[in-house]
Amino acid sequence: MSEFVFTAPATPSVAVSGSSSRFPVRRVFCVGRNYASHAREMGSDPNREPPFFFTKPADAVVPASGAVPYPPSTDDLHHEIELVVALGAGGANIDAANALDLVWGYGVGLDLTRRDLQTAAKDTGRPWDMAKGFDASAPCSALHPVSEVGHPAEGRIWLEVNGTLRQEGNLNELIWPIADVIAYLSRFVTLAPGDLIYSGTPSGVAALKPGDRLRGGVDGVDLFELEIGAR
Ligand code: MN
């Protein structure tokens, strides 16, 4: 057996509610637009576009607690509250009817976005990676197994910043329900245990600044509190 040339990086992981065991993260997929209200606020027609996906590095996942750093190279860091789907099984070309069988559990996360870099990337046809996949760009709450929370298909999804409600929607407003998201994504990549899917955000995305205190949740799943750190 060969050895690594230096100590291999640790496996990124997420806390599991009520357990000392952790959920190992393999890959992080994000749905681009999945609530009609947010699609409209970003200037697209929610009825005409199939879901599209982008990714973040696995080690962009950090606890949605304590201080989350304000990233460098942006003046327009945006919050996007999202239901996080954690897969415990995988496969390719999954039928939507069987897709929820892949789900291990659910959590609540933030798809933090350097909106200024994303807008520039859209304008120039360049990739979104540096707008979406920066360090600590995917805070996530503890995960809750399906045995505890079921497969939430409705429930309020919300985010407060400094005590003011900024984002609010309901899981029943998803353009593509979770089963469809998994089925569609599995046409492009072979999914595997440890994959996380950030399932899209409702309207109300806006800028954050250092020192902002965030409280967000999905009713019936979890809630989190964190603070945006200094630049
Ligand atoms: Mn998002």
Image (cartoon, rainbow, N blue to C red):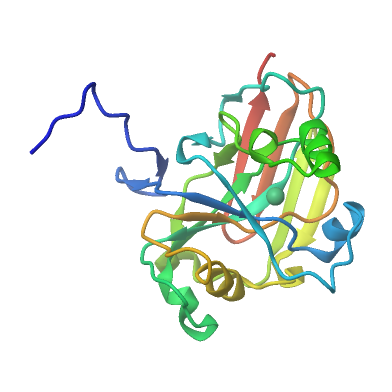
- Whether residue 112 is visible to the viewer of this picture, yes or no, is no
The quarter of the picture where the C terminus appears is: top right
State the count of labels. 0
169 or 39: nearer the eye? 39
In the current view of this chain or complex, which residue is farthest to the left?
Answer: 1
Q: Residue at x 74, y 51 (%)?
A: 158
162 or 98: nearer the eye? 98
Q: Position of residue 121 (x, y in %)?
A: 78, 39
Q: Is 169 on the left-hand or right-hand side of 190?
A: right
The quarter of the picture where the N terminus appears is: top left
Q: Position of residue 22 (x, y in %)?
A: 34, 45
- In the displayed structure, would residue 13 be above or below residue 209? below
Q: Residue at x 11, y 34 (%)?
A: 2
- In the displayed structure, would residue 170 be above or below residue 101? above
In the current view of this chain or complex, which residue is farthest to the top?
Answer: 231
- In the displayed structure, would residue 131 be above or below residue 145? above
Q: Is 78 on the left-hand or right-hand side of 96?
A: right
Q: Position of residue 95 (x, y in %)?
A: 50, 83
Q: Is 31 on the left-hand or right-hand side of 56?
A: right
Q: Residue at x 84, y 73 (%)?
A: 48
Query: Which of the 4 quarters of the picture holds residue 124?
Result: top right
Q: Position of residue 6 (x, y in %)?
A: 23, 21
Q: Residue at x 33, y 48 (%)?
A: 19
154 or 175: nearer the eye? 175
- Whether residue 1 is visible to the viewer of this picture, yes or no, is yes
Query: Which of the 4 quarters of the picture holds residue 118?
Result: top right
Q: Is 142 on the left-hand or right-hand side of 222?
A: left
